[in-house]
Image (cartoon, grey):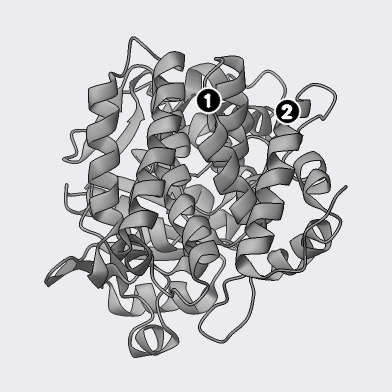
Amino acid sequence: MKKIVIFGAGKIGRSFIGPLFANAGYHVVFVDIDRTLINEINRKGFYNVIHIKEERKIVRIDNISGVLATDSEQVAKEIAGAELLAMSAGPKALPAIVSLIAQGILRRFEESPELPLDIIIAENLRNASEIIHDLLKEKTDPGFPVESYVGLVETSVGKMVPIMSKQDMSDDMLQIYAEPYNTLILDRKGFLNPVPDVPGLAPKENIKAWVDRKSFIHNLGHVACAYLGFVSDPGYTYIYEVLENEQNKTQVRETMLEAAAILLSMYPDVFTMNDLTEHIDNLIDRFENRSLKDTVFRVGMDLHRKLGPEDRLAGAIRAGIRAQKPVNRILYTLVCGTFFRACDENGDLFEGDEKFIAHFNKGPWHVLKEICGFDDDIHPGLFTAAREYHDKIALSTGSSMAHGS
């Protein structure tokens, strides 16, 4: 039986990558640091993905097993005998994961030097293949043929998986809720072996264009719902509630269309405006899924990352400035993001967002410089507009955080 080893038994690993390959006849081996989770996977041997739309559909995922990430010997053994690897554990875990993978690859090369190994990189990370390539070069022996033995396959992961309540997780720690979207866009050129015959895989020639579409349309539009919604009414809990307000919905759509014009200027041979507009309307329809109960908190949290220099908002603004395209709506959304203070079900801010507030309290220019990475000498108009938006939002929300510096 064919086997895929997936690093990360979290939301995307269990709701998306695992089911795609399990349903295509692969044995799925999850590698994770969570001992309790791995023990439960091995005890049960299956789990349920609950697709949530108007009606719930339970999809049972069988033919699975788990290996604890600290068991490096067993991990290496699994890698040596796998047809394919996948990674979905978050950027912070990459160095540790690549170190494990390197051990397995070296063992595999000793046993089967004629069998290269492809790695599907299901991480929310731009230039992921370059980053992992460099890490692999560090972790393998000098002269090891990384380029000819390891295929690094970037992806654009568009599946939405909400935060589950403590009650849902206590009922069954393996079950996972997700929208019924199961298309994995990936880099055809990244494979050294033939692209697996797996329903749901959508190989593309120019993966960078599709990764940027995910960041500048999907991710940007999603946080636009959270940030514009929170400023208009901090009482919103769910994303669908934000979009029930037609003014919010129009603002979100227009912001996404502004980003689409930027993306089209970057990749005129890949996309059309009609394609991107249809994609935007499809995404908004998915964002409106009431049954998914995706929270404003989940979508907007982690401000330091989501307002970062190359991420969805600041990254799109940079691209727009280079292309001499309007960025006003995107910039307004970014400034709304600086006011974001949504809490989880326990009334707590995301831990990193508490640190972000310290930057916010120093004023909008400080955020643009230190968090977003903009330079007021290069883009003075951007700073002027951001300050105007900041003061307007502060006034409309009754905030005392308007600053003149």
Tell me the crowding category of disc 1: few under 14, some 14 to 19, or many 20 or more residues within 10 angstroms, Cα based: some
Left or right of 348? Residue 299 is: left
* Residue occupying the point 35% across, 43% down: 253
Inspect the image, locate mark 2, and give the three-letter code of the amino acid beneath it.
Gly
Q: Nearer the viewer, residue 63 or 209?
A: 209
Q: Is residue 57 above or below residue 275?
A: below
- Left or right of 108, for residue 386: right
Q: Nearer the viewer, residue 173 or 308?
A: 308
**Mark 1: amino acid:** Pro
- In the displayed structure, would residue 395 be above or below residue 191? below
Q: Does label 1 or label 2 sit earlier along the sequence? A: 1
Q: Is residue 272 left or right of residue 341?
A: left
Left or right of 280? Residue 133 is right
Residue 11 in the image: state x and y as whole percent.
41, 62
To which quarter of the image does residue 130 belong? top right
Q: Is residue 264 visible?
A: yes
Residue receiving disc 1: 326
Residue furthest top as drawn:
269
Marker disc for residue 381: 2
Quarter of the image for residue 128 reads top right
